[in-house]
Image (cartoon, grey):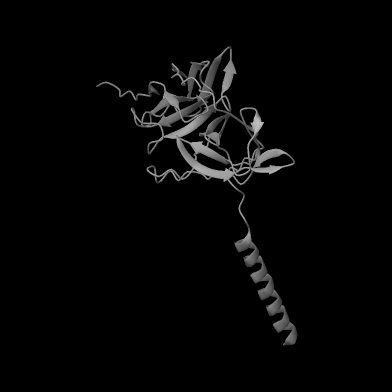
Amino acid sequence: MLKRLSLALLLTVVGLFVLAGAVLAVPSLPFSPYGIARLDGGYVGAGTAVSAWCGGAQVRATAARVEAGASWYVNLDVPGDDTSTPAIREGCTVSETVTFQVGAAWSEQAIPWVSAGPALTLTASTAARPAPVAPTVTPTRAGGTVRLSWADLPDDRTYEVWRSAAPYFASGAAGSTVIANAPANCTAAGGVFTCDDAGAAGDPAVNYFYVVRAGNATAAVADSSHVGAFTFGLAPGN
């Protein structure tokens, strides 16, 4: 009887230990860049704000600290955006461009939001930047793949490829999503970017439309014209 009771108690304790471990486990952060922050070629003072932006909205900020004569930023934990609440910007969607400010100046760095924590040196400048220019996008089809191509323009630093089933959608509106980010995950050759949307063509019941949004690593953006790829079903004649 004592042995059975001891075994039951042991199993109970083990079970509680496993449960407690599961409850206390800390999930990995979605996007937490860290590194050195510089402004106009020099280090910034302790307490200088370092912020992350998506879609023209600030989504997270931290304060720089000085160690060994250098300015560092950490804890810039950028959450993912809740797509079910399009009117509220909680964070960034996958592949959406994240831009940064050091103080009130924009950094040269801009990278797509991913579930990772990259080391990233931010080099900001108070100098004015040229406005981004909307690209001219050419759609083609290869089997079930929709291919979008456009020339890389000198005043553009990043490009987001947005997709929706609505013909004249607004980038970031409900039902739209970023499917690619150039130059991060598109092909570049001869000054032309090419992004593929595999499996997007071939179903007459579903047709997609696209906008390529150009950015200059600030909050400024310029959208291309809407383009689309269509599949029509043919009914046999009488």
Is residue 11 shown left or right of residue 206?
right
Is residue 42 shown left or right of residue 235?
right
In the rendered view, would you say 78 is above or below 106?
Answer: below
> Can you tell which quarter of the image residue 187 is in?
top right
Whole-percent x, y for residue 159 in the image: 50, 25
Which quarter shows the C terminus?
A: top left
Direction front: furthest residue: 45
Residue at image point 63% right, 58% down: 25
Whole-percent x, y for residue 30 in the image: 58, 45
Q: Say whether residue 182 is visible.
A: yes
Whole-percent x, y for residue 143 in the image: 48, 22
Residue at image point 54% right, 18% down: 193
The foreground one among 180 and 111 is 111
Count all numbered tags in the image, as a single digit.
Answer: 0
Q: Say whether residue 78 is visible.
A: no
> Can you tell which quarter of the image residue 32 is in?
top right
In the rendered view, would you say 112 is above or below 145?
Answer: below
Direction left: furthest residue: 238
Which quarter shows the N terminus?
A: bottom right
Is residue 24 shown left or right of residue 173?
right
Whole-percent x, y for residue 232 in the image: 35, 24
Residue at image point 72% right, 39% down: 69
> Can you tell which quarter of the image residue 169 is in?
top left
The foreground one among 71 and 192 is 71
Direction top: furthest residue: 190
In the rendered view, would you say 204 is above or below 93?
Answer: above
